[in-house]
Image (tube, helix red, strand yellow):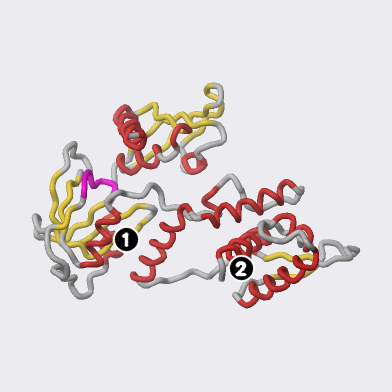
Amino acid sequence: MSKRKTERLLGLVVCLLSTRRYLTAEQIRQAVPGYPDTEDLFKRMFERDKEDLRDLGVPLETGVNHPFDEEAGYRIRQQAYELPELRLEADEAAVLGLAARVWQHAELAGAAAGALLKLRAAGIDSDLDVSAQQDIEPRLGTPEPAFGALWEAVRDRRPVTFPYRAAGRSEPQIRELEPWGVVNRKGRWYVAGHDRGRQATRVFRLGRIAGPVKFCGPSRSVIVPDGADVRELVRDWDSEPAREHTAVLRVRSGAGVGLRRHAVSVRDGVSEGWDEVITRYADGGWFADYAASFGPDVIVTDPPDLREAVIARLKGALS
């Protein structure tokens, strides 16, 4: 399937999912990018697209909004389209995690968002919020620089060394690790394996790696123990209670949807164009990355160490 057709079908699915009304063929042509202006060409292409969606298992419905409507329309009911709960093996989850990471800046997201904006412009209500990119475009937060090297080390079974800043420590320490796997949990990336210095199994958060990851041994020299479950190791490690901190932020009006969703409190209009958001966080490094990802739309006012950490990340991005 060509990229152009894939974008068109994605736009069509998002368009039909976003409203409870049946949309006529003409409304769909006006909303979904990629359809020709010529009537005959559009009809032939639209008929093929409908068949393709049905072949893919998309529950495309035909009906009318009112008994007196002369032309039938189309929609996709969200309840019929939603998937049941999925249970994935460790390797399947890892592949999906990588796919989502690759799609973080996908052009498909723009095509789908464009369809929703055109529906709004035509006066058709949508159930999806086009201002929230995460509804269309999967994101896993700021990519960690250590990810590529660690993934290569896991793939090639190579030991690595890296400076690591543990929670509560101001200075990083050099760790030597035989990595068994890299996984994502709750939007954060972790590596688990055998720590040669401690002679024990350890889990490390990629966001706390404070420098380059270097190979320190040949390929195929790391042996993963039978029955080692990296996802279970990370789950157990991440389940330990962590001390929470409070952050006071200035967030530009209309921005910072994710911050507002999990905030302790939000005060609108504390100054012109800015709101005050108070939220909690456990990991200062991860939260500094997250706050910095909003760029000029978020200013940390307290605590000072978090503010300095965000400033340092923004300066690093500029350089």
Q: Is residue 239 visible in this depiction of the protein?
A: no
The amino acid type of the residue labelled 1 equals Val
Q: In the picture provided, is 201 more to the left or to the right than 257?
A: left
Up the image or down, 225 lies above or below 39; here it is below
Tell me the quadrant of the picture where the N terminus can be found. Answer: bottom right
* Residue matched to label 2: 81
- Residue 20 inside the magenta-drawn segment: no
* Residue matched to label 1: 183
Q: Is residue 132 visible in this depiction of the protein?
A: yes
Q: Position of residue 248 (x, y in %)?
A: 41, 30
For the record, the magenta segment spans 207-212
Local packing at callout 2 (Cα closer than 10 Å; few below 14, some 14-19, many 20+) is few
Q: Residue at x 79, y 68 (%)?
A: 40
Local secondary structure at mark 1: strand
Up the image or down, 142 lies above or below 202; here it is above
Pick whichever of labels 1 and 2 is earlier in the sequence.
2
Q: Position of residue 110 (x, y in %)?
A: 57, 52
Q: Main secondary structure of the magenta part?
A: loop
Q: Quadrant of residue 303?
A: top left
